[in-house]
Amino acid sequence: MRRPTGRLLAIWAVTSAVVTLLGPLAGLLWAAVAPKVTYVVVQGEALLAQPEDQGPITIDARFALIAAVAGIACGAVAYLAGGRDNDSALLLGLAVGGAAAAVLAWKTGNLVGLGHFEDVVRHGRDGTTVTGVADLRAKGLLTSWALPAVAAYGLLELVVRRLPAGDLGDAGAGEADEVGGGELDLESAPAGRDVDGRER
């Protein structure tokens, strides 16, 4: 039986909201684990103190890792918590919520220490050094939450076979059961007769 459209919209909205709210928490974690990159002030601009420094790349990589892990977790929880016939609403919620959560994670993490950084760059003398803030250079990584979430949900859908409500997976009378690699009809015969209906 198809679920009412209103119920599917509610599932989509709740899923999107819950996933989105996780974004700022992920952003704070990203800011905490991002490597410290040193910049030098030159004519009111912040330039890498060591141009060969791989810090900015590492910052992007850690954002992608945090977002991907969060996305996989969201996809798994949505699959386990959701019921049958809710797939379309849950997948849409994971996609929309994951995209919003990634943006919020980026913006939240970038705000940590941003005021001090901009103040030093704006008023610092040439040669002044300042520690940078977490920032995302590869904006394509903003898909690192939504895509793994949807992929995890889809993979679980392929691997785990969810049964219809009330179905415990037991074969009923006349259904084929595998015994020793072959199929046998285990239908119970009436008293006094064999399966073919002949008297014993």
Image: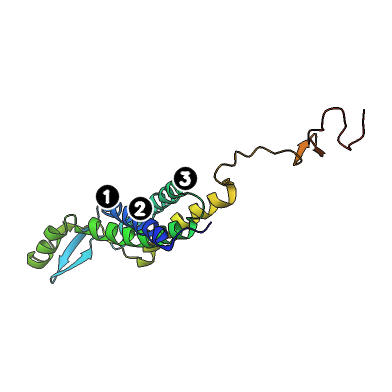
Horizontal side of 199 relative to 179 (left or right) equals: right
Identify the secondary structure beneath mark 1: helix
Q: Residues within 10 Å of mark 1 (few under 14, many from 20)?
A: some
x then y, percent, for residue 144? 40, 59
Residue 40 visible here: yes
Q: Residues within 10 Å of mark 3 (few under 14, many from 20)?
A: few
Residue depicted at 26% across the width and 53% down the height: 24
- Residue labelled with disc 3: 80
Q: Residues within 10 Å of mark 2 (few under 14, many from 20)?
A: some
Where residue 196 sits, quadrant-wise, is top right
- Residue labelled with disc 2: 62
- Residue labelled with disc 1: 25
- 1 or 3: tag closer to the N-terminus: 1
Kindly identify the amino acid type of the residue bearing the numbered disc 2: Arg
Question: In whole angstroms, how far apart are the C-alphas of marks 1 and 2?
Answer: 14 Å
- 3 or 2: tag closer to the N-terminus: 2
